[in-house]
Image: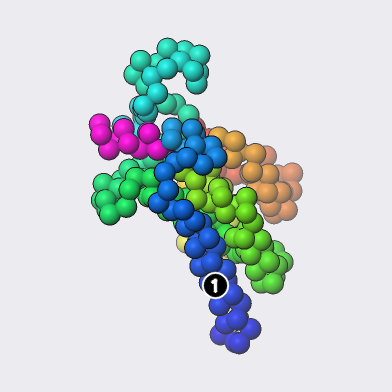
Amino acid sequence: MNLMKRIHLGLLVGILVIGFILRLYRFDSPIADWHSWRQADTSSVSRIFIEKGFDLLHPKYHDLSNVPSGLNNPEGYRFVEFPIYNFFQAGLFKLFPVLTLEEWGRLITNFASMFSALLIFLILRKHQNERAGLIGVFVFAALPYSIYYGRTILPDTSTAATILAGIYFFDLWLKEKVKYKKFIFYFLSILFTTTSFLLKPFAMFFTLPMLYIAYQSFGIRIILNRYLCVFAITSLFPV
């Protein structure tokens, strides 16, 4: 590894560490900041998992009113997003109760935010250069808006991370020549894309870069490409 590569690697690690630390601001504070009601609802689902068991297909929370949906909800069902985020939040709390449930939620979001930052660097480096990648990751890591939502108890940051991973591995799949690597990238892209759709269905809007990359590789034949058809069906079916 030459000197410039080492410098770039050091800068990347430094930016990620600083970004992670910035998102630890008021790490142990109660849920009383902006969007506190939405964060409390999300964490409530995780708390029900801890109290009554992990029923991913029938998530519930502590609101029995008809205010959110206009419908009576005596069982407290919460069919908003598939509770992947809550599964990890509650699961990590049960395994390692050294942190509170809310702190685990913030930590998951923090790691997801830094994973997004790393993916931004990798995508920009691949399509531009390392300098562009470093600028991109620095802006994302230091942007106040990103810092705030990078520490909230919400699934949105995890959605951004998984769809970025889906785009990144989709791009690698199209460019890779080695068959076994191509299969791995294809599988990872489907896995992360599907996860993002389950976390937040509006992640489908962010598949436009995939369509553009696929068009660059196949042209108008993307409509008939069997791998792309399997990709689309497999990603959408769980939703």
- Residue matched to label 1: 14
**One can see residue 187 in this view:** no
What residue is at 50 percent from the left and 61 percent from the top? 20
| Residue 86 highlighted magenta (yes or no) | no
Give the total of numbered labels. 1
Is the N terminus in the top left, top right, bottom left or bottom right quadrant?
bottom right
What residue is at 59 percent from the left and 75 percent from the top? 11
Name the one closer to the observer, 146 or 128: 146
Does 45 sit left or right of 1 as displayed?
left
Q: In the rendered image of this protein, does residue 171 appear above or below residue 227?
A: below
| Residue 51 highlighted magenta (yes or no) | yes
Does 36 sit left or right of 99 as displayed?
right
Report helix, strand or loop for mark 1: helix
Q: Give coordinates of residue 131: x percent, y percent.
A: 69, 72
Q: Give coordinates of residue 239: x percent, y percent.
A: 49, 32
What residue is at 66 percent from the left and 61 percent from the top? 139
What residue is at 37 percent from the left and 22 percent from the top? 76
Colouring scheme applied when the structure was drawn: rainbow
Does 203 sit left or right of 45 as displayed?
right
Name the one closer to the observer, 170 or 120: 120
Where, by quadrant of the figure, is residue 102 drawn?
top left
Q: Give coordinates of residue 233: x percent, y percent.
A: 54, 36
Give the magenta range: 42-52
Q: Give coordinates of residue 212: x percent, y percent.
A: 71, 49
Q: In the rendered image of this protein, does residue 148 appear above or below residue 230?
A: below
Q: In the rendered image of this protein, does residue 174 appear above or below residue 194?
A: below
**One can see residue 51 in this view:** yes
Query: Amino acid under label 1?
Result: Gly
Mark 1 is surrounded, within 10 Å at the Cα level, by few (under 14), some (14 to 19) or many (20 or more) other residues, namely few
Magenta-drawn stretch, dominant element (helix, strand or loop): helix
Where, by quadrant of the figure, is residue 44 drawn?
top left
Name the one closer to the observer, 133 or 171: 133
